[in-house]
Amino acid sequence: MVKSSHSSFLKGEFALTDLNRAMVHHVFFWLKNPDSPEDLAALIAGVQSLAEIPGVRLLHVGVPAPTIPRPVIDNSYSVSELLFFDDVEAEAVYQEHPLHQKFIAECSPLWNKVLVYDSVVAESPIS
């Protein structure tokens, strides 16, 4: 599994061509106590632990970027998790894995909202 690193992503451990078949799992977390550095650190550590689950090809753990405010940007979340899997079946195994269940049990008291976006590559409507 490749941990969050732009350089390792480009080195080919998870080649750009793999994105053509990848399943993407993007999760946004809102902390109950967004001003708590301890809660933020605990959640980030918990998300980072998910990299050890078999089938996780790439994990990026992020916080809101200091971009120029625009009406289309929602930076109200505390932490984001972007995971890449080979396919939907690998993500289903991840969901039931004991490390994922441990993460939920230990970290869910920290958040008051979670939003998940799962996606696969869109098939071209042009034949």
Image: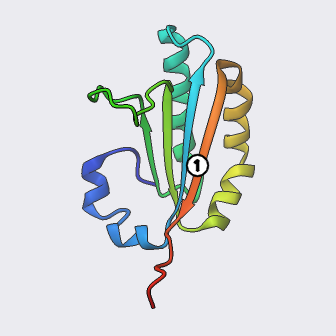
* Residue position marked by numbered label 1 in the rendering: 117
x and y, in percent, of residue 108 in the image: 70, 26
Identify whether 6 is placed above or below 23. above
The amino acid pointed to by label 1 is Tyr
How many numbered marks are there?
A: 1
Disc 1 secondary structure class: strand
Color style of the picture? rainbow
**Side (left or right) of 120 relative to 59:** right
The structure residue drawn at horizontal position 49% and vertical position 29%, both measured from the top left corner, is 79
The structure residue drawn at horizontal position 63% and vertical position 58%, both measured from the top left corner, is 91
Q: Crowding at label 1, few (<14), some or many (≥20) Cα neighbours within 10 Å? A: few
x and y, in percent, of residue 120 in the image: 54, 65
Q: Nearer the viewer, residue 108 or 50?
A: 108
The structure residue drawn at horizontal position 49% and vertical position 73%, both measured from the top left corner, is 21
x and y, in percent, of residue 15 in the image: 34, 67
Q: Residue furthest bottom?
A: 127
Which quadrant of the figure has residue 33? top right
The structure residue drawn at horizontal position 29% and vertical position 53%, both measured from the top left corner, is 8
Q: Residue furthest front?
A: 71
x and y, in percent, of residue 83 in the image: 51, 50
**Side (left or right) of 124 relative to 46:** left
**Side (left or right) of 103 relative to 61:** right
**Side (left or right) of 31 relative to 97:** left
Identify whether 39 is placed above or below 55. above
Q: Quadrant of the C terminus?
A: bottom left
